[in-house]
Each structure stands twice: as structure tokens, then as C-alpha cells.
Image: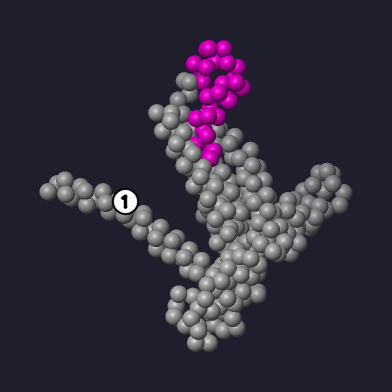
Amino acid sequence: MQRALTAIFNRLTIGVPYLWLIVFFLIPFFIVFKISLSETAIQMPPYNPVFDGTDTAGKLGQLSVGNYTFLAEDALYYRAYLSSLLTAGISTFIALLIGFPLAYGMARAPGSLRPTLLMLVILPFWTSFLIRVYAWIGILKPEGLLNQLLITLNIIDTPLNITGTYAAIYIGIVYSYLPFMVLPIYSALEKMDYSLIEAAQDLGCTPTKAFWKVTFPLAMPGIIAGCFLVFIPATGEFVIPDLLGGSQTLMIGKTLWNEFFANRDWPVSSAVAVILLLLLIIPIVLFQNAQAKAQEAGK
């Protein structure tokens, strides 16, 4: 009896996350994918349904890959995807350069001080994301706090035009997603046995060499997790490019919003979303499979 209850409990424990993924990921994804295979129409909703019986003209909804063909032929979407991936990659790299020393310092801090430092990292989440982005507009605009400070210190003579550029987007993304980089790295470094560094130095390693031979490899799982947690949402980011980047910056999140709301072209916007998802998910799945095979080979 106890074994049966344990087996049922284990199945429920495993089944709940799968149910969550099915309801909140797979089903919405297939709905979007279905819309991407439909044709645009002047109606509500603005597309001819497929797999739903007949359309408004009394005809069976036909599958169409014309939306994907359209994306392949229009250079705008190429540039939007590449710009988003490049911007997310640069932002992730900057977040790593800032986040790793922060996480390392937190992990090496006295135990009594770590909860306070951890709270300071999480503290920005207590404020609305939108308010924090708007705050950066007040800081970066020509008459904002940053330019006033630089002029007061005689570092510059004329205000810098930061808003409306990719530099502002980098600042906004790094600031917004930096905790997602710090926390996984901190978790990995906190569990590290620092006697390994002492052993490496006793064997002749310099502090720098011991860092690259011991600390960095042990922190790699946290680094990979942090990079994923920053890169994936940054690629499809809309609010930060729209508010800080202005109309001159091109990212796929803004393109998706324009297709969906301004142009009301749901099939094309759904195709854009499907391709974006595949660009992000497929490399992650391949990487995880490679990591699993490497661990099996190591055993």
C-alpha cells in the first residue's frame, strides 16, 4: 500500500510540471503555429481559420506557408532577427562581465553578510519593470541626471545623446536582467570548495591560473544558466527597445508588435513568433543534449 502511494505521489510530482508545460507552453504554441499557417483576412479575427471547419466564405480553411515565404523574402525580418540576436549577445556578455565579479564577491563575503547582499541584488524586482525603464529615460536623456553629472564634473561640454541609440538598449537590458546573471553564478560559487584553490596554489598555480583552472570551470554551470536567462528574454525584448531605443532601432520584438497591433497581420506576426521561438529553443536543446552526452561519456 505504501509503495503504491509512493508511486502515485512520484507520478503526480513528475506530472504537474509536464501539465504546466502543456497548458501554458505547448497549447499556446500550437495555436500561434496554426494562425501562422492561415491567410490574412479583413474580419475578426483577421485571418481565415485552419483546422476549424469552414472559413467565412464557406470554404475549408487551407494551410498556407506563404507567411514564412514572405519572411524569407523580406530583408526587414532578416535584419530584425540579426539585430535582436546581436543586441542580446552583447548585452549578455556585458551582464556576464559585471555579474561574475558581483557573484564572486557575494560568494566570498562573510556568511552573515550574504543575505543582505542577496537582498540588494533582488531589490529591483520589488519595483515595477516599466517604472524602472522609465527611470532610465530620466537618467539618460540630454537634460537628464547623467549628462548633468558629467557636465558638472567637466568631463563633457555638451550633453550626450544616449536615448534613441543601441547604447541605451544595452544599458536597459543589462540593468533589468543583471540579477538573472548574478543569482545562478552565485549559487554555483557558493557551493564551491575553496580549499581546491589553496591546493592548486600549493601545487604551483598562481592566483590567476588557479582561477581559470579551478574557479571558472566550477562556475560554468551557473554561467551557462545565467547567459540563457539573460539572452533568451533579451532577444524578444520589446519594452526596453521601444522606450529607450526609439523608432530608429530595429529589434524583432518591436517588429512583432507592429505586425500584430499596427498592421493587424496576425498570420505574419505568428510566423515571426514561431521562427523566433525555434531560433532560441533548438540551439538550447542541442546544447543540453551535447552536455548530457558529455556527462555520460565522463562517467
Magenta span dominant secondary structure = helix
Rendered residue at 64%/60% (across/down): 252
- Find out whether residue 198 is within the magenta segment: yes
* Amino acid type, residue under disc 1 in the picture: Ile
Q: Can residue 148 be seen here? A: no
Rendered residue at 31%/51% (across/down): 14
Vertical placement of residue 63 versus 174, above or below: below
Vertical placement of residue 164 versus 10, above or below: below
Rendered residue at 46%/29% (across/down): 192
Is 285 on the left or on the right of 164, as rendered? left
Q: Which residue is mark 1?
A: 14
Report the magenta residues as a range.
197-224
Q: Secondary structure at mark 1?
A: helix
Q: Residue 205: percent from the left, percent from the top?
A: 58, 16
* Count of number-bearing discs: 1
Q: Residue 244: percent from the left, percent from the top?
A: 70, 59
Name the outermost residue toward the top. 203
